[in-house]
Image (cartoon, grey):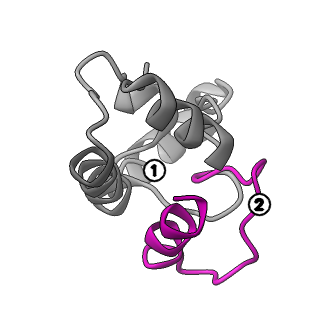
Amino acid sequence: MEKELRRLIESYNPLKDAIGNRTRLYHDLNIYGDEAAELLSRFSELYGVDLSKFRFNDYFPNEGDWILPSILRLITLKPSKTYKELTVENLEKAIEAGYLE
């Protein structure tokens, strides 16, 4: 199961970096937006993991979500939004638990 999960993540990994338990999908692999949504959808289907309580926007920015906020941050001097970390280990635990929160 661990190898299958890594293969799934590798299929969405634009950087083709080595993937370990502590690898973070957005922060390390730059997976976000539609690609992250599709990856999690396939993950849910393949492993029967319930994502109904998972708050996607807490972990990933949306496609194109950086342009306007970046301009506004420059004008207002507000810090950029920080996103929670979702790791391979989190996904492995979700498989065991049957849900991801």
| Residue 20 falls within the magenta-colored stretch | yes
Q: Position of residue 58 (x, y in %)?
A: 47, 25
Horizontally, residue 40 falls left or right of residue 52, namely right
Give the image quarter of residue 28.
bottom right
Please name the residue shown 78% across and 48% down the image: 22
The stretch drawn in magenta includes residue 27: no
Give the secondary structure at mark 2.
Answer: loop
The answer to whether residue 46 is above or below residue 70 is below
Q: In x, y percent, where is residue 78?
A: 64, 24
Q: Please state if 76 lies on the left or on the right of 40 as rendered.
A: right
Side (left or right) of 81 relative to 95 = right
User: Which x, y percent locates residue 86?
Assistant: 59, 38
Label 1 sits on residue: 66
Q: Of the residues under marks 2 and 1, which one precedes in the sequence?
A: 2
**Front-lying residue, 29 or 99:** 99
Query: In the picture shown, does residue 34 fall above or below 59?
Result: below
The range drawn in magenta is: 1-26
Q: As shown in the figure, which amino acid type bears the numbered disc 1?
A: Trp
Predominant secondary structure in magenta? loop
- Amino acid type at image mark 2: Gly
Q: Residue at x 45, y 39 (%)?
A: 69
How far apart are the alpha carbons under marks 2 and 1?
27 Å
Q: Callout 2: 10 Å neighbours few (<14), some, many (20+)?
A: few
Q: What residue would you read off at disc 2? A: 20
Q: What secondary structure is marked by label 1?
A: loop
**Quadrant in which the C terminus is drawn:** top left
What residue is shown at x 53% (from left), y 80% (from top)?
14
